[in-house]
Structures are given as structure tokens and as C-alpha cells.
Image (tube, coloured by chain):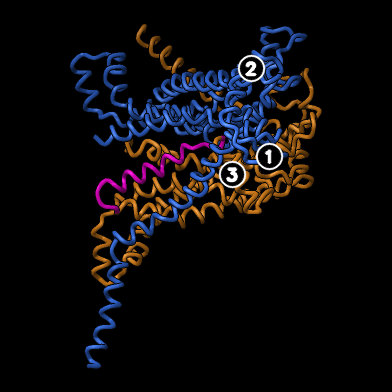
Chain colours: A orange, B blue
Amino acid sequence: MPRLAGKVVGQSSFYAAVVTLVVFAAFPFYWMLITTFKTDGDLYNLKSIPYWFNAPPTLEHLKYLFEDTLFVQWLSNSALIGLCVVAITLLVALPAGYGLARMPGRSGENLSIGIFLTYLVPPTLLFLPLARVITLLGLQDSLWALVVVYPTFTIPFCTWLLMGFFKSVPREIEEAAIIDGCTVVGAFVKTVLPLSVPAILTVVIFAFTLTVQEFVYALTFISSSSEKPVTLGVATDLIRGDIFYWGELMGAALISSVPVAIAYNLFLDRFISGITGGAVK
Amino acid sequence: MSVIAQAAAPRRLARSRFTFDRLEVLGPLFIMPAILYVIVLVGLPFLLALYYSVSAYSIFNPSYTFVGLKNFREVIDSEIFRRTLANTLIFTISAQIIGLLLGKIGAMLLMQEFPGRRLARALIVLPWAVPVSLATLAWVWMFDSLYSVINWTLVAAGLIDAAHRPQWLGQEDLAMIAVAVVHAWRLFPFGVVIFLAGFTSVPQDVLDAATIDGAGFWRRNYQIILPIIAPIIMIAVIFGTVFTFTDLSVVYLLTKGGPINSTQVLGSLAFQVGILSGDVAHGAAICLFLFPFLLVAVILLLRSLRRREI
């Protein structure tokens, strides 16, 4: 009997700990969700219990968000920036990762660590001079400024991830293709790339999510509403003076962060093995 | 004659093809675009930042006049900057400590098999996975001066008086706590994931052997598991520190550095001085205080990456 009681206590304190941690992590997202669908009268009422609907839920906020704000434009801006950055990243990081993986001796390893370290250089250190560079390029206040700048952090990280992957592709496969008459480039395109589809997919997802998450460069370079990516637009344009449109704001935050969170979750393990340098298998 | 000439041409072609077929030649060509990109858009801007910091450059007077270390002296002499530097350290260190503690606890919980484990992991990872600016907005709403759900709960629980609701983002001490909580909230899922990865990498036979030799729960934890996963944790701490230390979006969205610069961090102060006030030279000088710190992070990271290989 005491053993059973002990087990029950152990079990319930275990679940209590799990629930506490989950609530701490996820409550703000629950709060976004419920705020999105509450009527204004319900939101700004101190009397009622805020955790649940006290008036029937409404779609008013979402309707306003999609019809009377630039939200859709911001979403498509973010998508456009993301796609262009992914394209540039693949174009640069695929050959670089391959070249580094096949470099003789330790030089490839050292060079790749050098490139990887630039991932540690934060936007906070570079936004002032880059603002000047953007002006020189004539891209101030345009979303293309972000397309040019974002690869500075996606390329180092993705090159590093791809190099790790290409190293695991046996050299013999390319050599066989070369003996059969392929050029080096041909062998890379025809044998290595098809084998690397999972790695390339990971890189695409990462470059995209890292791009969507960025805030500092967007805040620094872009001031016209119509050019803003979604993170910046929602955070700066839906707040007018001291009046907050909380329903719209939370709806926008929820809609734009859920896809990113799902994508991130699917590829989390690879991200971790990327930054721990493959120390975790 | 003509036969020889005809034979020579394809051979030369073949040789040039051979040259371009050698990986030693192609390898550097493959890597070049990546290195150029990094040099042009990270290396050169960094040098420009260095130059800004010793010039009198501002957007109203864009002159590159050399003024030596004057900007740095003025920055260090300013009361606000010293407060800012201290804040940045406080937020970074507190976020790392809470992140590591909750990360370890969370990972130990998630190592157990229980129904709903995958869902629990997905929910716990959320704060790290979503864009920081959007997640911070939810906290701005939760800390609202009038409709804060946190205050509502505290009042309902009878812990505070409805007439004296705390102004989370409007009082110096509370604003510090608010920023620290959001940073820790954002970072701890990263800790969970890292510890999980670490725990799964510990070979089961090592643990079994230790158990047979009589090692209990704590001994296994601190004398076997921790030393094995220490390098991974080290790398995570380096990344976590860099992320928190250099972040400006949490402070910018939550408090704008206020009330009266009391929650300012290096990033937000540099943004305010360099972009909003247009004093690029002083802004650059403030940013560069990040650099020695990043250098230490880089050296530590290099050492742990090297150690891993040996």
C-alpha cells in the first residue's frame, strides 16, 4: 500500500512538473489564440474571467486584419524575401559545402569553421555600416535590401550543414561517375545532389525560417509600410500611437508564427546537430 | 602533317578539360562565392563600423573626420551607457542560468516515456521556434497596464490589491524583471533541446555499468552524464549567450529601453543613438563594446569544436 501511494505521488508530481513547464512555454500562444477570437467588449472588460470567452467568439478581428490592413501584403513580402534568400543561399552554399567537404587534409575543416564563425557575428554589430552599404546600393527602404543582407547569416550556417552532409557521401560514387565520363560538376549534379535531397530540404527550411524570424535589419532598413516583412509590419504598423488593436495584433502574430513553428519543429534535430558540430548523432 | 595537327587539338582540349576536372582546381572556385559574400557583406561592413567609431560621422554631417578614441571615452563616461552595459550582462546571465536549469529539468522530464510526450515537446519548443518579435508582442499584451492577465490572476488570487496593480513595463524594477522573464522564456526551450540531445548521446552501457557499480541517481547525474555532455552544453551556452547578449528586439518591443533608459541594452541603445538620433559614430562605438565579448565566445567555441575532434 505505501509503495502504491508513493508511486501515485511520484506520478502526479511528474505530471505536475510537465504541465507547469508546458503552461509556462505555451501560455502566451494560448493567449494569442483566445485574444484573436474575443469581441472587444469581452477583451476590455476587467470584471469577467479572461481565460475563456464571456461573449460569443467573433471573426471581426481577422476580417479587419485581412481586409483593412496591409497584413496580406506583409505576408507576401515575407514569402518573396524568403524565396529569394533561399535561392541565393542554395546557389552559394551548395558548391561551397561540397568544395569544403572534398578539400584535402584539414584545410577544408578550418576554412569551414571560419565561415561558420561569421554566423556568430550579430546584426546588432553590423546594422549601422550595412545601412550605409544599402544606401550605396540604392536599396534603402526596399525589401530587396533584405534579400541582399539576409544571406550573410543563412550562407554560413547552411554551408556548414551541407559540408557535414557531403562528407558522409562516399567519394567512390562520384569517382565512378567520373570514370564513366562525367565531369566533376556533372558528377556532383548527377550523383551527389540527388543523394542530398534531405539535406537540401533542411537547408531550404532553415534559410526560410531564419529569414522570417529576423527583425533587426528589417527595422533598420525599411520604413514604408508596403515594403515591410510580416514580423516588422505586425510589430510596428498595427500599433498606432497608444491604441493597440490587440485582437488584430494577436491574430496576425498567431497566423504568421504557426507555420514557422511547425517547420522548425520538424527539422529541430538537424539544427541541433548543426550547431553542436555533429557532436550529437 | 595534317593528321598530327588534328590529333593535337583534341589533346589540348582534353588537357584543359582535365585541368577543370581536378577537384583541387574546382574546389576553391566552388568555395569562392561564399567567401566573397561573407567578405563583402560582413567583413567590409565590420571595418566600416570600426572606422565610424573613431570618426565624427552622423547623418546630418557625414564627414569621416578622424577623432581618435573620443567617442569611446564619451560613451564610457555616460551614466546611461554604464547602466546599459550592466543591464545587458544581467539579462544575459539570468537568461542563461534559468535556461540551463529549466532546460535540464525539462529534458529530464521529456526523457521519460509518457502519453503526449511528443506534443509536450512541441509545445515547450514553441517560444524558441517562433519569430521573437511576434512572441514578444504576446508578452506586451500580457503585461498590459490595464488588462494584464498576470495582474488579473494576482488580484483574483488575492495576492495584490486591485487599486495598486503593478505596472510591469512602467516601473524600473518590474520592467527589468519583465525583460529578464521574456529572455529566459525564449531561451529555455533551446536548453531543453540541447540537454535532450546530450542525454540521448550518453551510451546506455556506461550508465548500466555505473549502476551495477553502485552509483545512485545523483552520482550518475553529476559524475557520469554531466562530464560526457559538458562539451555540448558548452556550445549551447556560447550560442545562447551570443543570442541574448546581442538581442535588441525583446527590449525594443517590450519597453523601448524605458522607463527612462532603465532597461536599455547595448543593441537597443545603439539603435536609438545610431539610427533614431542619427549619431552614427557614437552608435558604432556602443556596438563595438559587443566585440571583445564576441571574441571570447568565438575562442571558446573554437576550443570546444577542436576538443570534440580529439
> What residue sits 52% from the left and 25% below the top?
A22
Number of the front mark, 1 or 3: 3
How far from the left and from the top, in percent, is residue A250?
Answer: 69, 34
Task: State the image quarter where residue A28 is shown.
Answer: top right
Q: CA distance from mark 1 to mark 2?
A: 39 Å
- The residue singled out by tag 2 in the image is B79
Label 3: few (<14), some (14–19) or many (≥20) C-alpha neighbours in 10 Å: many
Amino acid on which disc 1 is placed = Ala
Task: State the image quarter where residue A110 is shown.
Answer: top left
Q: CA distance from mark 2 to mark 3?
A: 28 Å
Q: Nearer the viewer, residue B8 or B134?
A: B8
Number of the front mark, 1 or 2: 2
In the image: residue A75, left or right of residue A274: right
Q: Nearer the viewer, residue A72 or A154?
A: A154
Q: Are marks 1 and 2 on the same chain?
A: no
Amino acid on which disc 3 is placed = Leu
User: Please, what secondary structure does the residue beneath circle 3 have?
Assistant: helix
Q: Are marks 1 and 3 on the same chain?
A: yes
**Where does the magenta region start and end?**
A103-124
Q: Earlier in the sequence, mark 1 or mark 3?
A: 3
> What residue sits 79% from the left and 45% below the top?
A68
How far from the left and from the top, in percent, is residue A152?
Answer: 51, 46
Magenta span has A118?
yes
> What residue sits 75% from the left and 10% below the top?
B162
Q: Chain of mark 2?
A: B
Visible residue check, residue A20: no
Disc sitting over residue A130 in the figure: 3
> What residue sits 30% from the left and 72% below the top?
B16
